[in-house]
Amino acid sequence: MSNLPTAPNPNQNDLDRLKTITIVVYALQALSIFTGITFIAAVVVNYIKKDDVQGTWLESHFLWQIRTFWYGFLWGFIGVILSIVVVGYFILLANTIWLLYRIIKGWLRLSENKPMYPTQP
């Protein structure tokens, strides 16, 4: 017998509430294209609510959103640094397109009640 804690089995009301939080995080990420600061707010929400989605299909969306933040932040930082030699602007443009792709793909899968990383048969 394992001493590891098991993930709670949320009821439908809990899942609906958590799905709403996931929608809000995608919205904050989308707004970050214009405001930037909402990107940080989104990842803070992810980390605060991460334990609540553990063991549910929404956990994969949180992982997707957190990875989107960290990779987007990394490439944004590199792009800003390299903008003094022009190539950074291309990196920033590519990063913006990639962020839009990640947000749109995640939002679409969420709207279909599908996890981000389907399990293999």
Image (tube, rainbow, N blue to C red):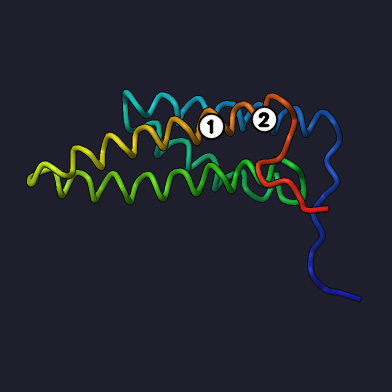
Above or below residue 9? Residue 39 is above
Q: Nearer the viewer, residue 101 or 57?
A: 101
Residue bearing mark 1: 25
Seen at 51% across and 47% down, the residue is: 66
Find residue 78 and report its horizontal and vertical position in percent: 24, 51
Foreground disc of the pair 2, 1: 2
Instruction: Give the CA distance from mark 2 to mark 1.
Output: 12 Å
The tag earlier along the polypeptide, 2 or 1, is 1
Find residue 103 and report its horizontal and vertical position in percent: 50, 32
Per the image, label 2 sits on a secondary structure element best described as helix
Find residue 97 and report its horizontal and vertical position in percent: 38, 32
Find residue 31 and report its horizontal and vertical position in percent: 41, 24
Seen at 69% across and 30% down, the residue is: 19
Number of the label disc, if any, that sits on residue 67? none
Q: Nearer the viewer, residue 95 or 15?
A: 95
Q: Amino acid at mark 1?
A: Val
